[in-house]
Amino acid sequence: MTPRRPESGRLLICDIIRVAVRQHNEKTQDMLVQRKDVDSMSDVQAILRKKKRTKDRWMPGERTRRLQETAVRAARIAGQILPGFLLSFADVMGIPSGFHAAWMAALAVMGESVLWPSGGCVLAFIMRLIWGLPLRPEMLITLGVMLIAPAVIFRRGAWAMMSWTVLSLLPTAAIGVFAGTAADGMRGVACVAVSAMSAPVMLRGLRALKGGRAIDGMEDRVALGYAVGMLLCGGARMLIFGLNVGMLGAAWITLCMGLYLGVAAGAVTGMAGGLVLAFQGMPVDLSVALGVGGFLGGMVQGLGRRWLTCLCFAMGCGLTMLLSGTGAQGNLWAVLGASAGMALLGRAPAESIQQLFRRFAPERPSAGDAYAASALANWEKTVEAMARAVPSPVEGEETRNADWWKTRLCAGCPEEAECTCMLEEKAAQRAEMVWASRHAEEEKWSLALDQLRGLGCGRLYHLWQGMEELRGEDAAHERQVQRSCHQRDMLVTHMQAMAGAARRFAQLSAGESWWDGVSARQLRKRLSELAFPATLIYARRVQGHAQAAFELQRSTEADVQAEELRQIASAALDVPMSVAGVEEDRVLLAETPLWTVEAGMAACGVDGSRENGDTHWLGQLADGRYLAALSDGMGHGALARQESGQTVTLLRLCLEAGYTRAQTLTAVNGMMLLASRGERFSTVDLVTIDLWTGQATLDKLGAASSRLLRGHSMTELSGDALPLGILETVESRACVLRLHAGDELVLMTDGVEDAFGSRTELDNAIREAASEPTAQTAADRLLRTARDAACDGRKDDMSVLVLRLGKTA
């Protein structure tokens, strides 16, 4: 008898499900075991997998690196060429385009290079020849005039910029007036007028775009929108691989606005983009199609699924185009191309785009906590006003004349009543000449005092003595003023830091956004479905990145539960999450950044033991930045370690409290100076790395030089600032670095640097250490080489920090 198929199929399905569940449980158990093994490791060391890492595994291949760097450079160059190319075709209502001249004039005023935009104009001239469009030889004259614009109108006003734009476009107007019809002449004059008036608008838009701050002003938004609109006009009639360039740009901008800013921004941007394209003769119905797509894309952006937003946008635009019959001429393919490209975009470029569009939506208080946010904002303004109102101890110089000098120099002289030597104008002038040398060295001061001879005074020694007393009083007064200025700077620094903290608290107390509410509902729903013993405290998006906090119902095995919560949150929010902290029964999760730092540290004292006078700190701050600090205290032993430890601790705490780098260095320097009175000091290497952009900032205060290794190249990083705790003012020249995957930053104290006989030996030792598979083994090898190389009594505390940057898997 033949077996029945339903039972056989049912058994087969059950077997498949059983095997899948078993494999999942084994994988989960293995992950939990790995997590337990890792918990005992230091927080400042990179967590390595159990499998053996091969040599140079952390560094990408040289060919891959070169291809990536070449692609990035090519993209940047293309971004500079494209505006000049598109604006050369941006004819509006029959008026010849002169917007490329306005664009280059704005760049020249800002001090930016006009070379690549000029290349775009040359490319536009060549493409006109290839496509059979009417040639405009006057474009070459305009281009020649604009090439010298940076030398003429750099940092000049709007009138100079507009005048130079008019000068560059005069050939266009002249050809229309003298070699064409009356209509051609009017169009030529209109081209000059419109382009000249557009130059200040484009300058405002460029400054808003390159400023790095929130673009919340109406004038900035209008200026930037005008510039983008002219770029879309330039590409509205271009078809590349069947895609309409103008429609592609409008669709991509609308999609990004809906994805990152919501329904209103997506719908309004789409309709505005369609109207701009209509100026080039394209169907007005495209405005409706883009508006519908932006609306639908914005409706689902709160779910945090980029692919879903792109799908809804494509469906909204595509269906509207099909119903209205406007999908021809590459419009439909442009929408599909923009949607597919955005959906398939990697995390790193998507993060850069998100940071750009988030500048259009600064955080504002919501109705829920508007009162608290308003109170904090008022407190911030009050503290800032107090900081500005702190009086300065610097006073104006006292008016000195002949009577003043006689009163000060002749006081106590037996012949003061009869002597008139200091009442003459000549005597006052000589006294002023001597007084001008009061800050000079003793030898020059003595020579200056000799100028008092010849005044006819019988008691010249009394004048000298009086001048010496005045010099001493002035020196004491200047020291007091300097101390008072230092105390004022310290007070202002702390007040400004408090004002900045109040500003951040006001933003955080503004209440949850719609995205926060949706995320919270998703997490609570997932916890309820799994019956997980934890309660969601909050789910927020801080600076565009997800964070969530949970309270565990049982605090036993908190690390295991934290890992399970990480997996749940990653699946619910559709973003990779990591455990940011576990405190008793509370778990904090944060979105995993794009970059990760692998750190290694090695140290030894003068006697070869691990204890020395150096202190370091490695870890992640509350705002997500990675901090690496290395300090070398004065001398050796416990006292030096105490000073360097206090320095590093204060640096970390100030940064954790929200102080800026400059405020942190000023505050810590003042604290160290007050404690040691300038008799002891500590060198500092302070590195902060933005794990979302890869940008690092290095401050060096009296520290030994560092090395940055990138592939086979090595760059020395040094600074000439004095250590902390010597002078009242801190002058640190920060070094800003753009790090890439595989870059290695080596920090060391002077004991390591001085151990080698030459810089060549030191560089060779660093290169050899860089070949180690991990940052820790690299630090150990460099320290071991330095100890072996130390000779001729060159013995000092030695510390090495190695930081390797990599992309998050």
Image (cartoon, rainbow, N blue to C red):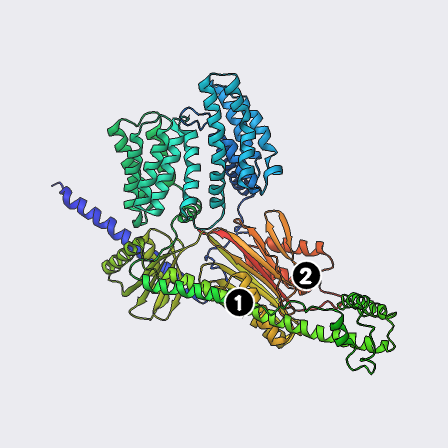
Q: Indicate the secondary structure of the residue bearing disc 1.
A: helix
Percent x, y of residue 434 = 79, 67
- Eye-nearest disc, 2 or 1: 1
- Mark 1 residue type: Val
- At 51% across and 66% down in the image, what residue appears? 389
Q: Tell me if residue 498 comes above or below residue 320 in the rendering.
A: below
Crowding at dot 1, Cα within 10 Å, few <14 / some 14-19 / many 20+, comes out as many
Q: Tell me if residue 300 comes above or below residue 326 in the rendering.
A: below
Q: Nearer the viewer, residue 375 or 583?
A: 375
The residue indicated by pointer 1 is 492
- Mark 2 residue type: Glu
Q: Indicate the secondary structure of the residue bearing disc 2.
A: helix
Q: Residue furthest left?
A: 1
Percent x, y of residue 553 = 28, 69
The numbered dot on residue 753 is: 2
Percent x, y of residue 126 = 52, 23
Q: Nearer the viewer, residue 752 or 297?
A: 297
Q: Where is residue 32, by image quadrant?
A: bottom left
Q: Do the residues bearing badges 2 and 1 touch, measured as CB atoms within 8 Å?
A: no
Left or right placement of residue 629 versus residue 586 in this view:
right
- At 17% across and 45% down in the image, what residue appears? 8
- At 67% across and 64% down in the image, what residue appears? 750
Q: CA distance from mark 2 to mark 1?
A: 38 Å
Residue 393 visible in this rendered orientation of the protein: yes
